[in-house]
Amino acid sequence: MMKKKLRKILRNTSFLLFACLLVAEMQAQSTFEAVQSIFEAKCMSCHEGDYAGGLNMSGTSDDMYNAIFGVTPTNPNAAQRGDELVKAGRPYKSFLLRKINNGLIDAHDAPLNANEGTIMPPPDSGIEPLTNVELETIRQWIYAGAPQTGNVVNLNTIETYYTNGGYEPLTRPEAPAEDEGFQIHFGPIFLTTSVEKEFLLKYDLELAEDIEVDRLDLKMNDQSHHFILYKFNGNAANTIDDGVREVSLFGENPFLVNSSLISTWQNDDDLRLPAGTAFYWDTNTVLDLNYHIPNYSSELILPADIYLNIYTQPSGTAIKRMKSDLLLYSDLFWSIPTGESTLSEPVINNQDWNIWSITAHTHKLGTDFDVFLRDENGEKGEQIYEGFMDYNNCNCNIGYFEWGEPSIRYFEPYLDLPAGAGLIHEAKYNNTTNGTVSFGLTTNNEMMITPIQYYTGDPIPFVGVPNIKSVYCSQDEALDFVPAGGT
């Protein structure tokens, strides 16, 4: 009897050991090895030995990687649009992914025209097309920088999402007409349950000519915390790795000294710059996309996306360059104790600021946010931002501060702030946790930031419709025009 029990225990132990070894082996497999297995199963029959289309995938793992990574396609059409077979961080500029897309990736992201051949594997080849899981594995590997080594994609999250489902993908908004601008798509980035992540992605626009940008229309998942658009200064982008970089307080962080702020979003918003102003982007412009997404669900996987429609006008159209700043509380080592507390400090402008917009940013312990003009004694003067106000819908005091989607106040006409006059910004918190909370990047930490947009120097008249919206109803009141009499 004892021998039977012992044999049973040994059998169970052997099975558990085998299972552990199997899991360890799967975890040890690099993401590229998983990608290589997909290519071997679905592509190798046509791309081995006497290979098709100038792509030979046969040989060692090194041979396959070197054949696809960073390689210019032999197809002239794909090469002209700036594709590589696999372009690190840019799945929609990776010709190989566009060729094997089986409908998972939106046609707008991965257009394949008649000059670029047919989809692969060919429909009449008898080879099964790539599954959604296989395509997503390749897309996420490319987003991660397409490295040859390391586990850079959670394959289990992808498998679970396409097997069991999760949040619905964000619906793509219509892109600008070709002569009006272009669309940037960052995503999907998959977040497993009950996590919060923040990412950066270097994005070379590869502009053919200098442009001005007069409108930025953003759509992102409802769960999103923020999206920030930066532009690298000079050649600083050359020092940054391709592919998605995860943000951390003492590692890769979004407050970069080698980039300039373009704009911030804490919810969907259509940013229409006033007439006569624009952002200036030259042919060397490289953007840095900063996306902060919590997934608070304990059950559903979240595919997080942003779509940014960028509307352009010819260089030389605008009179003034629109500028943006994040006015941070100067001491990044501040903390707030339990209970209620207030942070307040002045911000001095060293140039004339013609302020167009101002808003607030805290995390979930924030209970109010106010901004004042600084008077001649250096004290709080006229209040120009009240955290309880909903400036964008009812222009009324709603009685509380909506920290997740704070209102934006637009000054149309502009608010003139002479050099040296300065502002005072002030945030209030109620720390309901059991300990102190310090500055940090997640919503469990805290922040105090005043995002602001302005132009400098001599003022220009405001021309347009104050607080213009994307949609109006026929029963709305008549539009105000500045100056009066506009059409």
Image (cartoon, rainbow, N blue to C red):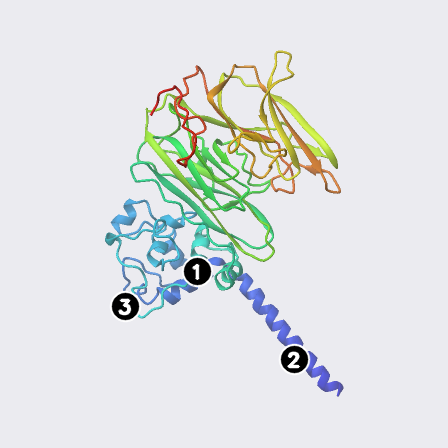
Instruction: Compute the Cα span from label 3 to label 1.
Output: 23 Å
Q: State left or right for residue 270 relative to residue 5.
A: left
Q: Which residue is mark 2?
A: 11
Q: Nearer the viewer, residue 73 or 383?
A: 383
Give the residue drawn at x 66%, y 34%.
367
Q: Mark number for residue 35?
A: 1
Q: Amino acid at mark 1?
A: Val
Vertical arrangement, residue 5 with respect to residue 448, above or below: below
**Classed neighbour count for the residue bearing mark 3: other residues with Cα under 10 Å, few (<14), some (14–19), many (≥20):** few
Residue 430: image location, x then y, percent:
70, 36
Q: Amino acid at mark 2?
A: Arg
Q: Nearer the viewer, residue 393 or 254?
A: 393
Vertical arrangement, residue 19 with respect to residue 414, above or below: below
Is residue 128 among the parts visible in the rendering?
Answer: yes
Residue 169: image location, x then y, percent:
46, 53
Given the current orientation, which residue lies at the most extreme left position? 115
**Classed neighbour count for the residue bearing mark 1: other residues with Cα under 10 Å, few (<14), some (14–19), many (≥20):** some
Q: Nearer the viewer, residue 393 or 126?
A: 393
Q: Which residue is mark 3?
A: 124
Q: Earlier in the sequence, mark 3 or mark 1?
A: 1
